[in-house]
Amino acid sequence: MIQGVSSCGWAVPPFIIVKGSNHLANWYMETDLPLDWVIATSENGWTTNERGLEWIQHFDKHTKSRTKGTYRLLVLDGHESHYSTGFELYCQAHNIITIYMPPHSSYILQPLDVGCFAALKKAYGRQIEDLMRAYVNHITKVEFLVAFKAAFFALITEENILGGFQGAGLKPLDLERVLQRLDVKLRTPTPTGTPLPANDPWVSKTPQTA
């Protein structure tokens, strides 16, 4: 799992989470990763509340010197690790205001999803295809890190990031862009409960007995 943006001066360096429990020396010695990139581990390779707290500290470290004013606004996708108690307390203590996107909306609202990550995934896939053509059929974490680094520097550029913000309607601000992409269909609510019988006209009848 990758969190963050870039090791360039205009963005946050990546925070990479890999499956495992121990760090291996060759992850660093054989990959030539930038020194400000972070590799963390978790049991399944996904973020956890502990990794989320480490990431917000990473974010704070690389953004506080460029803060304009008192507060920073951090837009998040609502994953559990983004609103744990430790995460929220750290944000409050360091003047980081969090705002969460509605569920299943990041492909529309998240600028990097809109402008960068899909292309990054394709570029990484091409790197793996090149390895397979060279008869490298088992991708270790070292091969992953090398391939990801090449794809990252090719696709995560200042131009593409700014294009993502434009595509999401944030810069320049375009309030109609997101609304136009929403698939909203108006419909009349279906009544609940047992339907009433049809109002047949009443016909008088003479009662019959045995």
Image: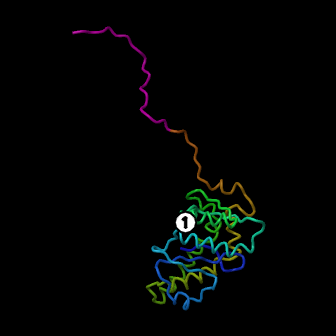
Vertical arrangement, residue 197 with respect to residue 121, above or below: above
Q: Position of residue 97 (x, y in %)?
A: 68, 62
- Residue at (57, 78) in percent of width and height: 123
Q: Position of residue 12 (x, y in %)?
A: 66, 75
Vertical arrangement, residue 148 with respect to residue 171, above or below: below
Q: Is residue 5 left or right of residue 20?
A: right
Q: Position of residue 100 (x, y in %)?
A: 62, 59
Find the residue positioned furthest to the left: 210
Q: Position of residue 68 (x, y in %)?
A: 78, 68
Q: Which residue is mark 1?
A: 81
Front in this rendered view, residue 121 or 44: 44
Q: Is residue 193 magenta?
A: yes
- Residue at (55, 65) in percent of width and height: 81
**Which residues are drawn in magenta?**
190-210
Could you say whether the residue bearing mark 1 is in a helix, strand or loop?
Answer: helix
Q: Is residue 149 magenta?
A: no
Front in this rendered view, residue 125 or 147: 147
Identify the image quadrant of residue 51. Answer: bottom right
Q: What secondary structure characterizes most of the magenta part? A: loop
Find the residue positioned furthest to the right: 69
Identify the image quadrant of residue 151. Answer: bottom right
- Residue at (58, 66) in percent of width and height: 86
Front in this rendered view, residue 142 or 64: 64
Q: What amino acid is found at the position of numbered circle 1 in the picture? A: Ser
Q: Tell me the crowding category of disc 1: few under 14, some 14 to 19, or many 20 or more residues within 10 angstroms, Cα based.
A: some
- Residue at (67, 72) in percent of width and height: 60
Front in this rendered view, residue 72 or 153: 72
